Image: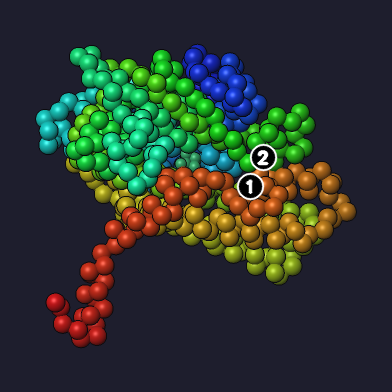
Amino acid sequence: MLMTGSQYEKSLRKLNLVVYLFGERIVNVVDHPMIRPSMNAVALTYGLAHRPEHTEIMTAVSHITGRRINRFTHIHRSTDDLVKKSKMGRLLGSLTGCCFQRCVGMDALNALSITTHALDASRKTDYHRRFLKFLEYVQENDLTCDGAMTDPKGDRSLAPHAQVDPDLYLRVVERRTDGIIVRGAKAHQTGAVNSHEIIVMPTIAMREADRDYAVAFALPSDAPGITYILGRQSCDTRKLEESTFDRGNLFYGGHEALVVFDDVFVPWERVFLCGEHEFAGGLVEQFASYHRQSYACKVGVGDVLIGAAQTAAEYNGVAKASHIRDKIIEMNHLNETLYCGCIACAAEGHREASGTWMVDTLLANVHKQNVTRFPYEIARLGRWLEKYCRGRADVPAEHRMRILRLIENLTLGAAAVGYLTESMHGAGSPQAQRVMIARGVNMKEKQAAAKRLCGIPEE
Ligand code: SF4
Ligand code: FE
């Protein structure tokens, strides 16, 4: 079943989530003015799937049921699927101008499809069958999943088991015949309160002593014992203002939450990793690589920012000035360079033993690393246009203000030359990608090529 946007909204109303914002419990989550824009953004991932012109990109055919499903619940089966995933990210980014949140769940499903298959092949476990059953449920009901990875981490120099407070990484506190009890938290969870399901994964590679922390599972987002504490965002209280004038983005936004698991029961059928610590690192890498590819979203946001900058230039009567045109060209150059990266890591993908198509890890990391740099340059160029421009007499002042507020919304506030926070910190910090890039490049081969050309013999 492909849900519509309004069916999705209705389905969220049935959830009984425990959500806190500004220190208070929120009873009506869906209609809260600070949360609703983020719900609207996810709703568009449903709405677009029904538009004939977007069917190819927004939907796919399930490899389990053969039925048409939303691409956000699909397991990539080919290079074409991966390329379409990147195009879907750009499309939604350009229509929402924000984070539409649903990628994390898609990336978690794809990573789990690879890891549970590998686990069963080497351990004779039953994880892949359980996973496929869960996947079918998600596909058939067109659910939004939160992919929950980042633990609070406490003292970064200590392994999970060595923390003074053992709950700073999420862990299994009890194994029962019918399931496990888990305790801990996942931080900065994108779109958490707009999700039907929470998919939990470990956050780092682990050793034997950390086996209780090597756990992956999925739970309904309103399972007893789960609490959501919503984080703040730049300019977010603007969403509470009655007039739309200063809101910037009138329709869409994102959200992140701290998700606390206070001794939550998970039935075995929903457990996809439990104690097999050697598989934690691989799962993290697969999820991270998929999610770094997902930053095609920021190319779409770049489209919006470039459109806003061009509009501001026109409003100010400077669109024809050569230095302004040059800046717009540079913004486009940087934005399309980002696009090259997310298409390239998709095009260079390969088949895993499970049948899942995996992105090229090195290129996915290079792409996300570029996303931590180029958008800030794009934003800086856009703000120059804003700063040095005067208004044209035939453009209403209100229109100028609206477009400038949108630029402000996209670049994080009046004084900063920023970009949506997840550009920098989503899918792991820039350093995480640099570590993977260092690991991913074949340095020996490059050195051998250099030595060969200048006549230094192989060692
Ligand atoms: Fe998707 Fe992450 Fe981009 Fe949000 S920031 S739209 S979750 S890839
Ligand atoms: Fe992210």
Say which element carries label 2. Answer: loop
* Label 1 neighbour load within 10 Å: few <14, some 14-19, many 20+: some
Q: Quadrant of residue 65?
A: top left
Specify the amino acid type for callout 2: Cys
Q: Can residue 212 be seen here?
A: yes
Q: Residue at position x 36%, y 32% from top?
A: 165
Q: Residue at position x 20%, y 86% from top?
A: 455
Asked if disc 1 is less than 8 Å from ligand 1, the answer is no
Q: Which mark is residue 387?
A: none
Residue labelled with disc 2:
235
Q: Quadrant of the C terminus?
A: bottom left
Say which element carries label 1. Answer: loop
Residue 358 lies, with reference to residue 136, above or below; the image says: below
Q: Quadrant of residue 366?
A: bottom left
- Looking at the image, tell me whether mark 1 or mark 2 is earlier in sequence order: 2
Q: Is residue 111 left or right of residue 7?
A: left
Marks 2 and 1: in contact by CB < 8 Å?
yes
Q: Position of residue 195 (x, y in %)?
A: 46, 26
Q: Residue at position x 26%, y 67% from top?
A: 443
Residue 70 lies, with reference to residue 316, above or below; the image says: above
Q: Position of residue 380 (x, y in %)?
A: 63, 59
Q: Quadrant of residue 285?
A: top left
Q: Is residue 208 left or right of residue 322?
A: left
Q: Which mark is residue 412?
A: 1
The Cα atoms of the two marked residues, 1 and 2, are separated by: 7 Å
